[in-house]
Image (cartoon, rainbow, N blue to C red):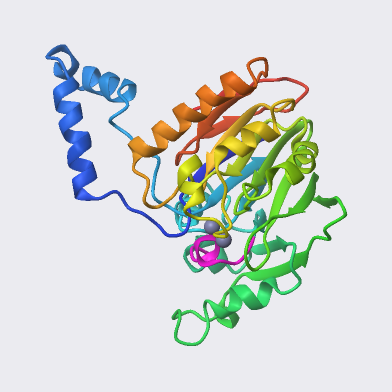
Amino acid sequence: MHIRFWGVRGSIATPISSEQLLVKARALLQQASNEDIASDEAIDNFLSETEHSWTYGGNTSCVEVSFDDKVFVLDAGTGIRGLGAQLMADGRGKSHSLHMFFTHFHWDHICGFPFFGPIYQPEQIINVWSGRSDAERLLEIQMNDAHFPVKWNMLPSHVECNQIPEDQEVDVADAKVRILPMIHPDKAYGYRIDHHGSSVCYLTDTEVSKQPERLAEHYAKFVEGADVVIVDAMYGFLEYHDHINFGHSTIFNWIDFFRESNIGELVIFHHDPLASDEDIGNLCASAERYRKLIAPDVEWRVSAAREGQYWDLGDRSGTQVINQ
Ligand SMILES: [Zn+2]
Ligand SMILES: [Zn+2]
């Protein structure tokens, strides 16, 4: 199983500003020595090592999970445009096994859909999955009327929408898929996908931080044994208390939940549009410090999602894990 992040931001796409770019440029110039810029190769090496040459990214939610020749897409935020371009370029965007899973239908999770290249391919069947029975209606309305020039019924591909029952595991293209109701306005569902011993959990847009003690066991049971657990951790501890009932969480509750769990990695996701790269880095560092205090003996670590972040979990007969 391969997992790749194409969009990690919450609520609204957040492109890097000129001001933020200047901060990075200044830090790079201050950090570079004469040797670091002596040749193209030296520059490449320097840029690959410094923390100032990249960003967590501003696209909204989209995660690619692929195995064998199958492509699963979790949410269709603005990040899906890049995934679509990649699939078209490498030949996986036409008459390929393609399944899309929606947590819910807030704009930040669907607004990339009309910009996803494979939906314009006549031979492509798009299998849409969600916990709701009205996914087609909800996707359709964002393209109809005066919202988008290509209307739903003009799409050349064939889009088929399916509902996943709350209490049942379903087989999708050789993988086992389960959903979990999230705590979020207008209904949302988290996912667990298992394939040949590898697994990923995607639990975004949920407010576990309001009554965490009621939920810990429930969530811990759902993620047990998963390699990568992606969670809504939009806010820091104090910021959360300014955003009660917004439907989002703080990472510190997730660390409490999984203090005795066997998982591979806990990933902070759905970053606040107001958070700079520095803010996200600081949140991740605080989370890791907290994990060391609360759960010093667990094997897993905490990371903050960034666009392009990638895992190759192999086929779990082997146990190769690469995180880039
Ligand atoms: Zn969201
Ligand atoms: Zn939402």
**Residue 7 appears in the figure:** no
Asked if the magenta segment contains residue 105, the reply would be yes
Q: Nearer the viewer, residue 247 or 151?
A: 247
Name which quarter of the figure residue 189 lies in: bottom right
**Above or below: residue 123 compared with residue 24:** below
In the picture as drawn, the residue positioned furthest to the right comes out as: 168
* Viewer-nearest residue: 46 or 88: 46
The reply to whether residue 162 is in sight is: yes
- Give the magenta part as a residue range: 104-113
Q: Position of residue 129 (x, y in %)?
A: 72, 61
Q: Position of residue 69 (x, y in %)?
A: 68, 43
Asked if the stretch drawn in magenta spans residue 148, the answer is: no
Quarter of the image that includes the N terminus: top right
Q: Which sits in the foreground, 110 or 283?
A: 283
* Residue 253 point in image, percent of width and height: 62, 38
Quadrant in which ligand 2 is drawn: bottom right
Residue visible at 88% across and 54% down in the picture: 168
